[in-house]
Structure formats: structure tokens, C-alpha cells
Image: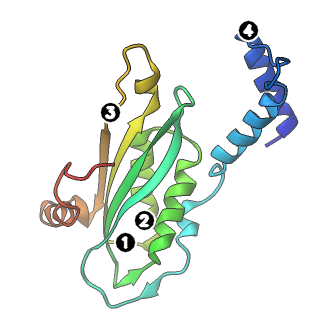
Amino acid sequence: MEKEQAAAAVRAFLAALDVDVSARGMERTPERVAEMYGYLFGGLGRDAAAVLGATFETGATGLVAVQRIPFSSLCEHHLVPFYGSMDLVYQPHAGRVAGFSRFVEAVDVLARRPQLQERLTREVAETVMRGLAADGVLVVCRAHQFCMALREGGTHDTLTTTSEALGALAEPALAAQAWALLGGAGKEDA
């Protein structure tokens, strides 16, 4: 990211909205905004599957669940936050797994770019499938969308839920087992 170019663009954007960036306290706002968005978009160009790192053999044959992975992202439509948590269940291939903290890192990489909740959910599922060569994966994402809350008559407590099932976990028998492992459909709060 070219910080000076980004700060100049923020300055022009604010001026177009009649915001006086020379007012006390606003003098460094364009630079701060450029720096913040550089961080918030830090997942661009990074491979989330690579973050999963080396896998290891456990001999495990059952489903593996990692729940309540917190995330925050920016909606690509309005560049305002949405935040919540992800639950994922995967079926290891030949007992190969990754460290649990690696899933948190992979979600963070994918969330730190302009996103849509539906796409983020799909990308997490695809990352686990590809990164672990998993037999199947189910991802459930629950989020609060600021674009809904900030608009006139906004809803502050609305929770949006998306899910994505791939491979063996898209099949009814294992899908039911995966949903049960997560406590059933829609029973967890973000």
C-alpha cells in the first residue's frame, strides 16, 4: 500500500463531503485512516491455506470441530464493519489435521480484506478443504452487520447466519452429524 497516496485520497474524499480536515483534531485523520485500512486489508494477497501450515498424522477418523472463532471484516459494499464468529467442522483425510490455532489465523487472513459474509464463509470452507485435503467441511458464520445498524431505522441486534458445506459434509448423514456437533442449526449466538 502506498500510504501517502492513500492518505491523499482520504483527504480528497473527506473534502468532497465538506469535512474540514484542518479542524483541530482532524489534521492527521487522513494518515490515520490510510494506516488503519492498510491493516484492515492486510489479508489481500495472502494465501490462507498456507497459514494452516504443516499437517500431522493423528490416526483420527472422527469429525473435528473448532467453534466460536472470532472475526471482524469490512463489507465491500459500504466499507463498514461486520463481525461475529465462525464454527467449522471438518472430516480429516487419512487422519491428517492442523493445529487448532491455525484455523483462527486462516479466518483472520480471509476476513482482513473487503468481504461479503457469504463469500467469507465459502472461502473459509474452501481453505480448509484445500489446505488440509480434507474429505469434507462445514462452516457456519454468524455476524452483526453495521451497514444494517447504521442506516435510518437500523437494526442493531440482527444476526445474519451463513453456512457452506463441501465434500463429505455436504452429504445428509455426515452433515447431520456435523450440525449436531455444533449444537444444532441456529442455537449458538455470535
Q: Looking at the picture, which amino acid does disc 1 mark?
A: Ala
Dot 4 or dot 3, earlier in sequence: 4
Colour mode of the rendering: rainbow
Residue 181 seen in this snapshot: yes
Of pointers 2 and 1, the one earlier in the residue sequence: 2
Of helix, strand and loop, which one carries label 2?
Answer: helix
> Mark 2–mark 1 contact, CB under 8 Å?
yes
Q: Is residue 23 above or below residue 34?
A: above
State the residue position of label 4. 18
Q: CA distance from mark 1 to mark 3?
A: 35 Å
Alpha carbon separation for disc pair 4 and 1? 52 Å
| Mark 3 and mark 2: Cα distance apart in space | 30 Å
Residue 173 location, x and y as percent? 12, 65
- Residue 59, horizontal then vertical, whole percent: 32, 91
**Of the pair 145 and 113, the residue shown nearer to us:** 145
Say the numbered circle drawn on residue 157: 3
The residue that disc 2 covers is 128
Tell me, yes or no, whether the two marked residues, 2 and 4, touch with CB atoms within 8 Å: no
Comparing 17 with 174, the one in front is 17
Quadrant of the frame with the N terminus: top right
Q: Nearer the viewer, mark 2 or mark 4?
A: 4
Residue 41 in view of the camera: no
Looking at marks 4 and 1 on the same chain, the residue that comes earlier in the sequence is marked by: 4
